[in-house]
Amino acid sequence: MAPFYGTSLYVWTAQITATLLFLALGYGLGGRLSLGNAPRSLAVVFSLAGFWLILFPLLRTVVLNISSGLGVSLGSFTASIILFGLPLLCLGAVSPLLIQQLDRLKSGAGSAAGTLFFTNTLGGIAGGWLTALVLIPYLPLRLALAGTGFLLMAIGIFLGIGLKSAKPINLGVLTAVAFFLFLISPGPLRTLQGMGTTSTVLFSKQSGVGLVQVFEVTRKNSSNSMRNLLIDGIAQGGIIMGNDHYVSCYAYPEYMNFLGHQFHPNARRALVLGLGCGVIATQLERRGLDTTVVELEPAVEEAARKYFMLPSDVKVIIEDGRAWLNYHKEKFDLVFLDTFAGENMPWYLFTKQALEKIKGILTPEGRLIVNSVTHMNGESPGLAMIETGLLQVFGEAKVFVEKRAMKDGNDLVNAVLVAGKNLKMEEQPVFSSMFSPRIKTKIWGLIKWEGRDARSVGVVSQDDFSSLDYVDAPLRLDMRRLILQNLDARMATN
């Protein structure tokens, strides 16, 4: 779901609702089936769950593309029901059926239930670790789900043979049909033609933060191409590839880099929280700053090194940014906070306590540079919350909201915030950097317009109470809606 619908609050709510609904229905179904032939019912529910999961590669793109017309919330809920409702229903029925079968073999339903729930919970722990540490990092999800389906069907056949209550030959035929359908199911789409452009997936890998992909878009009769890093379908940065150089295709990394230079031209050491495609770190390294990056996901560094020419001199530490801040004491002149996974920002890096940690590693004249997303008028609840937190911790902060014309009803823009003591934009020349003409014009605009002072108008986000995800959920939903207009589910898979 995530590479297509994202992981916003609305999507999580839809998925949890669908899961609990069909598990509950499955428990009720299992209770009714247990009054009849429990062994045969067990074989059937395992086989049906497996059969449907094997069809996942065949059904996924069709279901996602069709359901997208319903919007993010209802669409993801509907897609989840179609793709996973039947397996959840069947697997929910397993526990009541097993309790009934165990009670028949040896009376004592309470003892049977206790043993079953003990085993089930331990199995859930093992399955959770196996999924997170083995299946997701090293196996495409379409294959992991189909493989799980084959395993469930094998269990169904085994039960049918061992209990002599179902005809294993019928289950074997069902497995053969499922295997055939799996073989003819389309694999991930790697190249898409349209509107005079060719989009190619150069890299695709599931990770702990979502599906990490590198897209390259080339236009007909053009020597340049645009390369983007995406997490769950949302761009996390990109470059325009020339014959012997490249420039950023987005303005906000250059805003951050430029504002860091103008507010602290003598900076020598920089920390970047959130690597993205590595444009910010690369520009800092080009300017001669000793640059350290803290990035949570190894697949992001892999993509940045291989496809976005991240210099080897840039040190990347694979760790959660907040965990790293908790014990690190080394000082930096500039800290860049640009942490997105898809459309979401990790709220725990924007609490008052996290900002105090960042202030603690800054030199006396150090600056914190933050990237966020807001509406074109510079107003959104999430931005207000970040502004308020910066003012409480640093005392001073400025907000620079991207200026551009509304396009296709899209009024979402980047906002870059600068926090520190005695903030003043120095009258420095534009530093040497490889801007595209479009971005260079915007950079000069930043010199003429010094932004506005941050305002203390929101509630400060705290470690023990942060509503950043909640208040910004509508804005994140708008970001995902824009993606759904152009994203083909066949490309959003590995």
Image: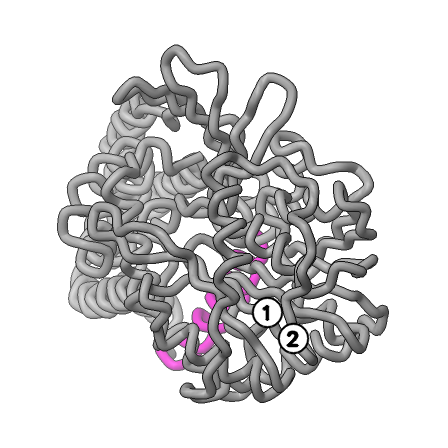
Residue positioned 32% across, 67% down in the render = 377
Secondary structure beneath label 2: loop
Secondary structure beneath label 1: strand
In the rendered image, the quadrant that contains the C terminus is top left
The residue wearing badge 2 is: 423
- The percent coordinates of residue 77 (x first, y second) are 22, 58
The kind of residue tagged 2 is: Leu
Q: Is residue 422 visible?
A: yes
The kind of residue tagged 1 is: Val
Colour scheme used in the picture?
Answer: one colour
Q: Earlier in the sequence, mark 2 or mark 1?
A: 1
As rendered, which of 403 and 169 lies closer to the eye?
403
Which quadrant of the figure has residue 14? Answer: bottom left
Disc number at residue 418? 1
Residue 394 is one of the magenta-drawn residues = no
Question: Few, some or many C-alpha atoms within 10 Å of disc 1 (few <14, some 14-19, many ≥20)?
Answer: many
User: Does the CB distance between marks 2 and 1 fall below 8 Å?
Assistant: yes
As rendered, which of 420 and 80 lies closer to the eye?
420
The residue stretch that appears in magenta = 109-131
